[in-house]
Amino acid sequence: MDKVAYFKITRLKISRFKLHVDETEYHFGDLTMISGGNHTGKTTIADAIVWAMIGQGFFGGHLLDRFYNDKNREKRIAVELEYVDASGIRHVLSRQRINDKVDAALDGSVIRQKDLNAMFGDADEFLSLVNPLYFIEILAEKGRGLLERNLPSVKQEEVFQRLNKDSQKALEGYSFLSPEAALSNLRAEQRELADAMMVLNGQSDLLAQQNQERHDRIQVLQMEINALSEQIAELEAKQKTDIDEDALRLEFASLTMRYDEMLNEKPLAFDPLSYRVRETELRARLSEAERRTFESKFAQEIAVQEKTLTFMRSRYHQMAAFLAALKPGIICPQCRRPVKEDKILDCEVGLKSALAECKEQGGGIKLKQQELLVLETQSRRTFEDWKNSDIAEIQKEVEQLYKEEEKAAQKSAQEQADYTTEMEKISSRRQTVDVLLSCGNLTPAEEERLSELRKEIAAKDAVLDQLSRESSKPNQNVASQRDILQSQLNDANARISAVEDYASVRNELLFKALHTPNVEFQLYDVVKKTGELVPAWKFRYRGTSYQCLSRSEKILAGLEVVELLKRLTGRCYPVFIDDSESVDHIPRPSGQALISKKVTDQPLKVQAKNTPMNLPKAG
């Protein structure tokens, strides 16, 4: 939306707005007089105009429920405003509110408030142009931002041309966006340089003090080292008295050589492994011998004889039983035929003969069996004697093995003991010779004292060397650094002074635009201690602070501010002057003027007058 540089209100239609229950229409001219008693609707016209344009009241604010008509139960208000722009084109802006929902339209098309703000300015800017009292009474200190935002820019070249030569030289090559930011940065730099100068002076004093302390410390250390050296010399002299160091060194070398040889000749430790192997073999043989069993050569034959003897004995008993039971008809065990009665005697004789033969054969078999058993017993005894002899022989070998192992172990232990004794003897002598070479005739306490003295003197020598190196260092060129810092501090001070001059000249040029015949603004104060510019807000009319002005003076001052803002913003808008009865002579504002005047006990009256005017160009 394009900026509207000028407009004139020609018509206003109000419906259910504050006191207006019925739809009411007003017409306005270049100069419009609005008169009437209290509560007749004079200020209502101002509220309606502003509400149509920006959705707020004549003095701003968003408490819009007060615009509803108390007599109308329906929450609905409507305002239609007709205005003419700089090109003479008529436009109609309407706004309505129904149950807290607000709609606005321009020339029949819906329009957003932010689009209206783009055309007519935001609420503060619009109200400051329309209401002479709004900028000073409502915005007050916040109006500072509105002024600064609309002040014309001042070119740096123009400001530089007005500065004196010293300020121009101080600002050569120094760029900044604003003098306020530059002053803040420069004063911070000034403080840093001053602090650095203070630190440098402290460092200089500290270095001088440290150098003196180092010098004193060096002298003390040298005295302490000399005293320690004398004690060491005395102990070393005692240490070497009547000591043949060459002979001791030769002996020490010989002992060391012999010691190394002995290390290579160290006897091996006794190893029972071979004995365990032999023992295992013997135990295996012994176990095998113990497991041997007698194998009889006559067992089979004895078994055969026993079997035959058993058979003969069974046959004998069978025939004896048959003989005892012999009678006719019985089956003969020999011929397997029944015995006849006439053959019983023959059979009996035959059986007895057979029994005698069987007995004789059985006796022969038993005799032979007994002979075999005798041979068996002799053979078993021979085997047992041989087995026991073999076991005894193996056990004897085991015992002999144990004796050999014990003897070998004792021999190895003796060799180890002899070796250890010899090594201890050599080591002891080496230690003695080493002590003689290192300590000489000193006692252990004296040797310990000598070692402590040497450590102490070494530590003091290290400290002395460090102090000597520190003393030989240059004094960090403090004077040169001080000159550099002082030069930088002078440059910073010169630039601060130049930037303050720049700010003064810029403000002088910048605030020329704020000049009016009777109104005086002060937007900045100078801090006396630092010279820094700080935001301020002071407003005077004819030299009097605004708080002390009368009602008429406030209106007159507000009209001058409105004209100033018209010039700064490039917007020539209608001005609504309320309570004009308190002012005798109201100066004619540029653009359209709506002048409200209280006339006691008179109804509302709107009287429009048109006078020729030179209108600003559109845009």
Image: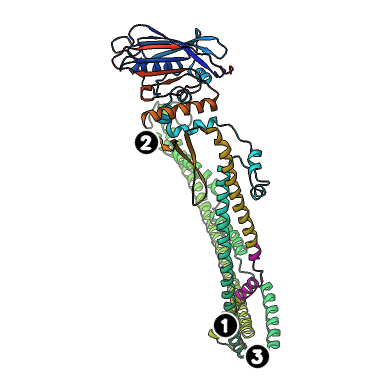
The stretch of residues the image draws in magenta is 461-480
**What residue sits right under mark 2 in the picture?**
548
Residue occupying the point 59% across, 81% down? 219
- What amino acid is labelled 3 in the image? Ile
User: Element at badge 1?
Assistant: helix
Q: Kindly report the distance in space between the C-alpha atoms of the residues bearing marks 1 and 2.
A: 87 Å
Relative to 171, residue 424 above or below: below
Q: Position of residue 423 (x, y in %)?
A: 62, 78
Q: Residue at x 48, y 34 (%)?
A: 144
Location of mark 1 (residue) = 224
State the quadrant of the C terminus. top right
Give percent across and percent down for residue 10. 47, 10
Picture quadrant where residue 102 is located = top left
Q: Is residue 56 above or below residue 455?
A: above
Whether 36 is among the magenta residues is no
Which one is in front, 261 or 207?
207
Say whether disc 1 or disc 2 marks the residue closer to the N-terminus.
1
Q: Tell me: residue 405, above or below residue 312.
A: below
Residue 243 has which mark?
A: 3
- How dense is the environment of label 1, judged by Cα within 10 Å: few (below 14), some, or many (20 and up)? some
Q: Residue 27, located in which quarter of the rendered image? A: top left
How far apart marks 3 and 2 lie (CA) works out to: 114 Å
The earlier-in-sequence mark between 3 and 2 is 3
Q: Is residue 364 visible?
A: yes
Q: How crowded is the residue under tag 2: few (<14 C-alpha within 10 Å), some, or many (20+)?
A: few
Q: Position of residue 330 (x, y in %)?
A: 40, 27
Q: Nearer the viewer, residue 459 or 38?
A: 38
Picture residue at 52% right of the left edge, 33% below the top: 514
Pick whichever of labels 3 and 1 is earlier in the sequence.
Answer: 1
Q: Nearer the viewer, mark 3 or mark 2?
A: 2
Asked if residue 478 is among those painted magenta in the image, a careful observer would answer yes
